[in-house]
Image: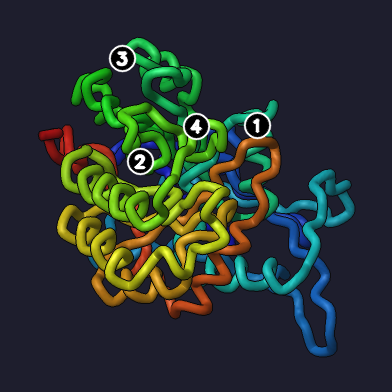
Amino acid sequence: MRNLYKSLVRDNEWFTLLITVRANQVQVRLNGQLVVDYVEAPQPGAGRKRRLGHGTFALQAHDPESHAQFRNLKVRALPDDLPNVTPTPVVDDLYREIIRLGGENFPLVDFHTHLKGGLTLDEVNAHMRLTGINHGIAVNGGIGFPITNNAGIEAFRQSMAGAPCYIALQAEGREWPTLFSREAIAKFDYVFTDSMTLTDHRGRRTRLWIKEEVDIPDKQAFMEMLVGKIETILDQEPIDLYVNPTFLPDVIAAEYDTLWTPARMQRVIDAAARNGVAIEINSRYRIPSPAFLKKAKQAGVKFSFGTNNTDRELGRLEYCLQMVKECGLTWKDMWMPKPDGQKPVQVKKAK
């Protein structure tokens, strides 16, 4: 019902788990840190039984090759009438779908979370415990963005030490690989970028989400330029994820289905496939389209979920989970960061 994906301890390292089950609540603390706070909500409808109850428990390894050691196991009974201070979640179809996917080990991770609009790390972790959605918190790095050098990377890493979430670099602008060392970049769990900051046909640095900076005299020429830029990004920049995919500026966004032709979609998909870059399903912009995702799935491209929040609202990956159903995605279609020690120092070198 609740899975944790970011490992907080290393292999061959002892740690302490405190697991508390009381009435309809389960809490798990790892080395004293609360990482799971699950409250079983009332299930409407006749015949719906509680999942939690009295009985035995088991310690289970993941597969025949897994090896785990346990020591100092202690169990004691707790009264059921102690107060529950954790909010009870609202039970709706999305809530049930998240529970179902969690039980199937489908990776429910929002890899594109920002601490923006006053949102704090504690609030992100509380959202994780309430919804069952894990998070990857990203900092923006590039010219004109919060981080511009290795020292900034290290300061961010220190601020996130011990957090039960992934940390990521959202690389901004096409010159970002020149700002950071390969060793500094490799300290993140993953790196991602988009094509929303580029040099346009006028030779100007343009941020496509700012309408005052966008100039599109010829829509078809713009699309050819954009797709070419995306191919270059995927071929040359050392990234794990390509986010905000198929984003179009407001002035032409209404023509998405016309401008994103099958041929243009295929060029982006082919570039992602040959470079092993995963494609984000973005809940904020509700992109890419189902047509794009079905093509990408057929090509063997992996996917990730992302919100790209600009404020405190994180949601519950509504569009992402809609696409899981509509496009028939399974856990095998989803991308996950490689564990420490298995990541390359740099995916590729910029040309």
Residue 150 image label: 3
Q: Earlier in the sequence, mark 3 or mark 2?
A: 3
Query: Quadrant of the image for the C terminus?
Result: top left
Q: Earlier in the sequence, mark 4 or mark 1?
A: 1
| Front-most of residues 211 and 23 | 211
> CA separation, marks 2 and 4?
23 Å
Pointers 4 and 1 in contact (C-beta within 8 Å)? no
- Name the amino acid, label 4: Glu
Percent of width and height locating residue 18: 59, 43
Residue designated by label 1: 122
Pointers 3 and 2 in contact (C-beta within 8 Å)? no
- Name the amino acid, label 3: Asn
| Horizontal arrangement in the rendering, residue 93 relative to residue 196 (left or right) | right
Residue designated by label 4: 213
Percent of width and height locating residue 257: 47, 69
| Horizontal arrangement in the rendering, residue 238 relative to residue 40 (left or right) | left
Residue 192 image label: 2
Q: Secondary structure at mark 1?
A: helix
Q: Indicate the quadrant where residue 194 lies.
A: top left
